[in-house]
Each structure stands twice: as structure tokens, then as C-alpha cells.
Amino acid sequence: MALLVPAGATPAWAHAGGLSSTASEARVLAVEPAVPGLTVEAVEFGARLRLLNGTAAPVAVDQRVVPPGAQLIWSEPRVAAAAADRPPAGRAEWTVPLDVDGRQVLVRGEQFWPPAPPAWLWIGIAIVLVIGIGAAGAAGGSRPWGRALLAAATLVVVLAHLLHVLGSAGVPADQPYLVMVLSAAGFALLGWPLGITGAVLTLRRNPAGPLLCVAAGALFAIVIAPVDAFTLVDAVVPFSWGADLDRALVVLTLGAGLGSVVAGMAALRQAGRR
């Protein structure tokens, strides 16, 4: 269980651009009074605000000046303060003052808390994957179907984490996509080819195959993916293709990764006996 919901990991590493899953999300309700050409919105699932200055005058916010035709994306302390404590109503209002050519303008918004996901269900699925893949791998050992199972489980881990990275990389609003892919990948730049090579060698009955599958499974399930386990308990997930899909990918990475470790170790032991 400690591997599934780590206590000491830093969730800021879980997604591209330093974003993390959270319990609440910010949204802008209105700009008062309305200024033609001035737009303020929440981006990155409420992590930051974006101001688009389509007016003919400069706009000042938090001691920063946005000239006409420019934009500003920033982390707003007032929003962070509203998110610090959940009120009984599940909503907290906040305001951000702007100066538009010497005129006072207020951005009104709120922090809201969506229902939390059923964490017990996602964790249960991960545990079932660990037990199922591990037990089947131990029974199959180095038999053809056992090798196919180990290779398939390892490839599932690689694909699940790759999709997690690709979906996370599209969230940061002001960063190049490829840069965010590399940022979110981290050690997976080693883990992806390691897992693919291990799966191919396992299917080819190369004795190094199961060892590489064990190494890849341990790298993903123990080193890389545990910080992503916060997505199983937080309602707001910075992922381009839906929070539940990201949770499913995290569960596959954790569950199939640990299952691959157990199955690969069984294959290595049986090969050693022969």
C-alpha cells in the first residue's frame, strides 16, 4: 500500500510543468466592470490565470504591466490562499484587482471542490493487477504462455506511462509540447527502451529478457509512478484527456509494473533451477 499512496513523495513531479493533482480548481466568473478586449481565464486546470490584453492600454496586475496585444500567465497568491482551506460550502470566492489605464477593475472568481474519486476502487484494481499478473507469471514461469504474459505486462506498463506523459505534457499553457514531454518523462527515457527490449528478448527466449522486464517494472512501479498515485485521491488532475483515463494509466503502471517484477522473478528462478 505504501507503494500505491506514497507519504513522502513530492506530487509536483507527477505531471509536466511542475503541475500536480489537487482537491480544488479555480475558475473566473466575471471581470467587473467589463472591458472590451480584456480577457481573464483560469488555465492548467486552475493552477494559473491567463490575461489577454486586447485593449489599447496597458494593464497592471500584481505589479506587472501587460502591454496591449500581450498576455500574462501567472500563479495568483489570492487563488492559492482560497484553495488552502476547504470551506463547508465547498466554494471560496476570490478577487484580483487590475489597473486598466488608471481605472480599477476586479477579476472575480471562485475556488470549487469537485467530488473526490473512489480511491479505494482504483487502489483495489492495482492490487488485483499485482496479484493476478504475479500469480499467473509464477505459474507460467518460462513456459511459452508465461513468457508471453510477462512480455505483454511489461509492454502495458511502458504504453500506459507513455500515454500518461503525452497527456500531461499538453496541459502547461506557455511551454513547448516536446519540452514538456521530455520534462515529464524523466527516468522513463531509460525505462521505455528498457521495457521494450526486455519484452522482445523474453519472447525470443533470451535469458536476459525476464531480467530486463524485472528492472523495467521496478523502475516504473517503485521509482517513477508512485508520485502519480496522488491522482487516485485528488479530484482535479492536470491531464489533457480526462482524469479517469489518467487514473487508469497510473493504476496500470503501478499494478502491471509490480506484477511484472513478480512474474519476471519467477521466470528467473525457474530458469535457474533448469
Image (cartoon, rainbow, N blue to C red):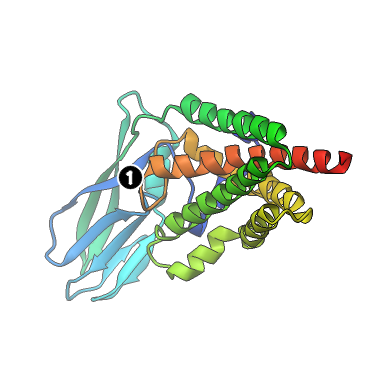
- Residue 189 percent coordinates (x, y): 62, 63
Q: Quadrant of the N terminus?
A: top right
- Compared across the picture, whether 116 is left or right of 181 comes to left
Out of 56 and 245, give the one closest to the viewer: 245
The picture quadrant where one finds residue 69 is: bottom left
Give the residue at mark 1: 26
Q: In this rendering, does residue 14 appear at all?
A: no
From the top left corner, tell me how far across and down residue 224 is, in percent: 63, 49
Res. 172 visible in picture: yes
Q: Is residue 13 left or right of residue 258?
A: left
* Quadrant the C terminus occupies: top right
Q: Local crowd at mark 1 within 10 Å, few (<14), some, or many (≥20)?
A: many
What residue is rendered at 26% in x and 55% in y?
41
Q: Secondary structure at mark 1?
A: strand
Disc 1 residue type (three-letter): Ala
60 in relation to 57, above or below? above
Which one is nearer the viewer's eye here, 160 or 228?
160
Q: Is residue 232 above or below residue 190?
A: above
Quadrant position of residue 175: bottom left
- Left of 94 or right of it: where is 80? right
Say how many tags the image has. 1
Quarter of the view holding residue 150: top right
Could you tell me residue 228's position as x and y percent?
54, 44
Relative image position of residue 13 (x, y in whole percent): 57, 51
Between 73 and 17, which is closer to the camera in this rendering? 17
Residue at 76 percent across and 41 percent down: it is 267
